[in-house]
Image (cartoon, rainbow, N blue to C red):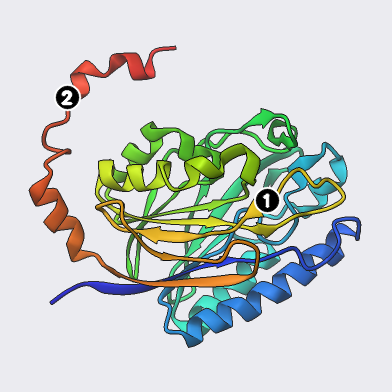
């Protein structure tokens, strides 16, 4: 019997001006996403992933300490608690990317993973932190992740998380595969002029090299007052052969739904024995300083 699970990726435009108060923006975006999660549940989704820093703008376009107000504890903050209630209500796994406070002054770009019974399973902290023009000043806001590449055993399968810039580093994608991931979710905020040509290359390549499903999420639209570029949406699922099986719109809110047959992973790995034929003893240069 096939192990088919239905997943959803949510991409959503900023619905409150970035010049509003941090609290007003966060409330508006959370309210919006609650509605979108409800819609995904109505479409039969068994798991859903939200976009990077889902309850705010991509504020890393500037360096302003006011955005520290967006931080919350994981799992004890109000946003994760709310999503736990939603997960339990809809019997749905939810991946919640938010701005995490470990302690005052120590902040991470993170994602909480909530199981279908509402229980908190753990979190991933973004490992690779960019700091570059135009408008990606992330080292001002985030400490590099320190939890490695965990894989979470959920009600729908084994899920790993990679966040945005992480996708440019194949080493962590391989670690997720070696740690047992069947589905890797990559919530992102990336703009057209910078990376669009890579959007359909890197993550299908990770799916092929590691023989798992990938769900890639990107927010849509432009965000003032910074206007660093167009967040081009086009969230998608691809399979272990690297084929895109569902894709979202470019510049509107969207819920991307796909059925993933997890048995395809075994079929592909029995054909292409990449894990069997690895030569880790020869890869020292990869981890050399």
| Real-space CA distance between mark 2 and mark 1, rounded to the nearest whole angstrom | 37 Å
Residue 245 image point, x, y percent: 35, 64
Badge number at residue 232:
none
Could you tell me which quadrant the C terminus lies in?
top left
* Count of numbered circles on the image: 2
Rendered residue at 21%/72% (across/down): 3
Front of the two marks 2 and 1: 2
Q: Residues within 10 Å of mark 2 (few under 14, many from 20)?
A: few
Of 186 and 106, nearer the camera is 186
Q: Secondary structure at mark 1?
A: strand
Vertical order, 2 against 26 (above or below): below
Vertical order, 33 against 263 (above or below): below
In the displayed structure image, the side of residue 287 where residue 210 appears, left or right: left
Could you tell me which quadrant the N terminus lies in?
bottom left
Residue 185 image point, x, y percent: 44, 55
Rendered residue at 71%/70% (across/down): 30
Q: Secondary structure at mark 2?
A: loop
Q: Residue furthest bottom?
A: 42
Rendered residue at 29%/15% (across/down): 284
Residue 104 image point, x, y percent: 76, 42
In the displayed structure image, the side of residue 154 where residue 40 appears, left or right: right
Instruction: Name which quarter of the figure residue 138 lies in.
Output: top right
Mark 2 lies on residue: 279
Q: Residues within 10 Å of mark 1 (few under 14, many from 20)?
A: many
Q: Can residue 185 be seen by looking at this rendering?
A: yes
Mark 1 lies on residue: 99
CB atoms of marks 2 and 1 within 8 Å: no
Rendered residue at 75%/55% (across/down): 222
């Amino acid at each position: 019997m096939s192990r088919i699970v239905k997943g959803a990726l949510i991409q959503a435009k900023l619905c409150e001006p970035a010049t509003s108060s941090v609290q007003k923006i966060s409330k508006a975006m959370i309210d919006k996403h609650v509605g979108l999660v409800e819609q995904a549940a109505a479409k039969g989704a068994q798991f859903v992933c939200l976009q990077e820093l889902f309850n705010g703008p991509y504020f890393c376009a500037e360096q302003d300490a006011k955005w520290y107000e967006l931080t919350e504890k994981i799992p004890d903050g109000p946003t994760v608690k709310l999503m736990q209630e939603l997960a339990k209500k809809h019997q749905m796994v939810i991946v919640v990317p938010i701005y995490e406070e470990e302690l005052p002054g120590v902040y991470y770009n993170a994602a909480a993973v909530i199981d279908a019974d509402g229980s908190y399973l753990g979190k991933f902290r973004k490992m690779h932190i960019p700091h570059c023009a135009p408008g990606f000043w992330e080292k001002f806001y985030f400490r590099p992740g320190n939890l490695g590449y965990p894989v979470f055993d959920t009600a729908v399968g084994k899920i790993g998380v990679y966040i945005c810039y992480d996708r440019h580093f194949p080493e962590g994608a391989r670690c997720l595969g070696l740690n047992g991931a069947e589905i890797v979710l990559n919530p992102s905020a990336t703009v057209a002029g910078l990376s669009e040509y890579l959007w359909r290359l890197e993550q299908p390549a990770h799916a092929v090299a590691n023989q798992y499903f990938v769900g890639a999420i990107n927010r849509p639209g432009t965000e003032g007052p910074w206007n660093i570029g167009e967040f081009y949406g086009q969230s998608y699922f691809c399979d272990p052969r690297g084929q895109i099986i569902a894709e979202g719109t470019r510049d509107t809110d969207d819920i991307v739904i796909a059925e993933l047959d997890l048995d395809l992973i075994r079929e592909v790995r029995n054909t292409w024995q990449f894990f069997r034929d690895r030569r880790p003893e020869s890869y020292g240069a990869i981890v050399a300083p």
